[in-house]
Amino acid sequence: MIESQVKKTIKEKALIRKGDKVLVCVSGGPDSAALLHLMVELRKDYNIDLIVAHLDHMLRGRQSIADANFVKKTAAMLKIPFIMERRNIKAIARSSKMSIEEAAREARYNFYQVAAKKVGATKIATAHNMDDQAETVLMRLMKGSGSLGLSGIPYKRRLGNAWIIRPLLDVRRMDIERYLKEHKFLSRLDSSNLKTLYLRNKIRNILLPLLEKEFNPKIKENLNLIAKNLSDEFNYLNAAASRLFKRFASYKKSEISIDISDLLRQHIAMQRLLVRQIIDKLKGDLRRITYKHWAEIQLMLSDAKKANTELPGGIRVTKRQRCLVFTKGSIAKRRIKKFKKVTKLNIPGEVIIPELGIKVSADIAGHTPRFKKGKKRKKVEYINGDSIISPLRIRMWRNGDRMRPLGMKSFKKLHDIFIDAKVPREIRDRTPLVISGDTILWLVGVKLAEDYRIEKDTKKIIRLAISTI
């Protein structure tokens, strides 16, 4: 009995609690029609309120209008509140440069989230079933998905302030059709599902029937089992990654950073999960994030010359000092434009530059520092303070700026110093200067000036330091 299986799924996966307000997503097709009637049967058992939601994709002309009218009449017959919207999916796909399938999916979930918030729903029920799961696993397998993709459609996941739930995920489509027939419940047929224009339809109408007939009659059940096993394993590893995220990631507004050394100490699988969690936190989802994007980030970790990459959804990944920094939107560029002023730095004293996410400090050192041969001192520098003009000044570097780098007799353009030091353009654009009078004494994190070298007779030593905030 389909009813008992649905009740079992709801109980085992904790999909519904007593008193929930459930937004039931109904297209009018057999799956969603069955879901609606099953939720009506469960209404008394769980003391839940139901609201029917329908989105007209405006893809099939009069058929789409007929679907909407059918769902509206069914909701009225069952005395359930009804909410609907119409969205021109073709226009959305064209303007956003997405496929029809992708645009329709994004529009649906956006509508569900907005509708749920409007009516105060705690759960959003969709009609995904066992056949959908099998199709999804095969589709993602062909696209080269990892363990998360192959774990398929989850039984529940957060969407805004509500949870999406899939009570029919353990039910076969043939059992759904039998249920409708036995109870004489009506539904609509989406003619586009019979066409093989889209990949999912090709899998549903051609590949799966072939696999069932020629290879394994239980292929759908086996694909669902693969999804369940991988889902359990992924959830376990993802929980471990969440603990590492809390330990190592620094999160502020629309930027998350993680120390590269902390990331590289993890197993390669955990590195990927940590990166995925960072992207998910900023972007809000992982749609359009593929293995190719992870490979780009992996290259940044291993190649000193690779300093940044762009990800879908306006996510920018940058190497900054010893950190990997993930920024949403064009915030990094906006910050550069904002920081145009000249800032004073007293000795002792410190200056916080929120536009660059750094703090620069200066104080008088109590002793002559000992430097180990070959050790890089990018975050801390010691300079001769005998001829310092105080206060020091901090500003961004400009084209044409020159300084005499430590160990050199002649002046050199900062642009050439960056190139010689193999400093990536992204980091150059975020590099300030510390200036004494009209002389550049520190190209922060890159080069110190020869004019302020510590000598044997130096009386006052100044310690300069940069740190992230």
Image (cartoon, helix red, strand yellow):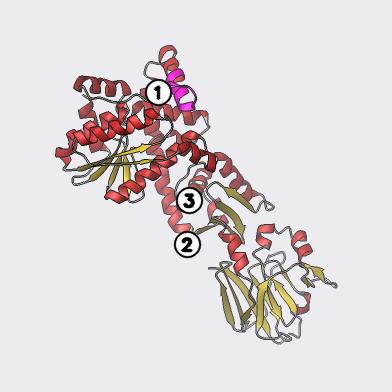
Give the residue type that dot 1 points to.
Answer: Ser
Mark found first going from the N terminus, 1 or 3: 1
* Residue in front for this viewpoint, 200 or 268: 200
Name the residue: 67% across, 51% down.
Answer: 306
Q: Which residue is mark 3?
A: 283
Above or below, 387 against 142 in this view is: below
* Coordinates of residue 408 in the picture (x, y in percent): 82, 71
Q: Which residue is mark 1?
A: 191
Give the residue type that dot 2 points to.
Answer: Lys
Q: Which residue is mark 2?
A: 253
Give the number of the mark in front: 1 or 2.
Answer: 1
Give the number of the mark in front: 1 or 3.
Answer: 1
Above or below, 154 against 262 in this view is: above
Q: In the displayed image of the protein, which residue is found farthest to the right?
A: 409
Task: Specify whether residue 200 is painted magenta.
Answer: yes
C-alpha span from label 2 to label 3: 12 Å
Name the residue: 61% across, 56% down.
Answer: 319
- In the image, which residues are magenta? 193-206
Q: Quadrant of the N terminus?
A: top left
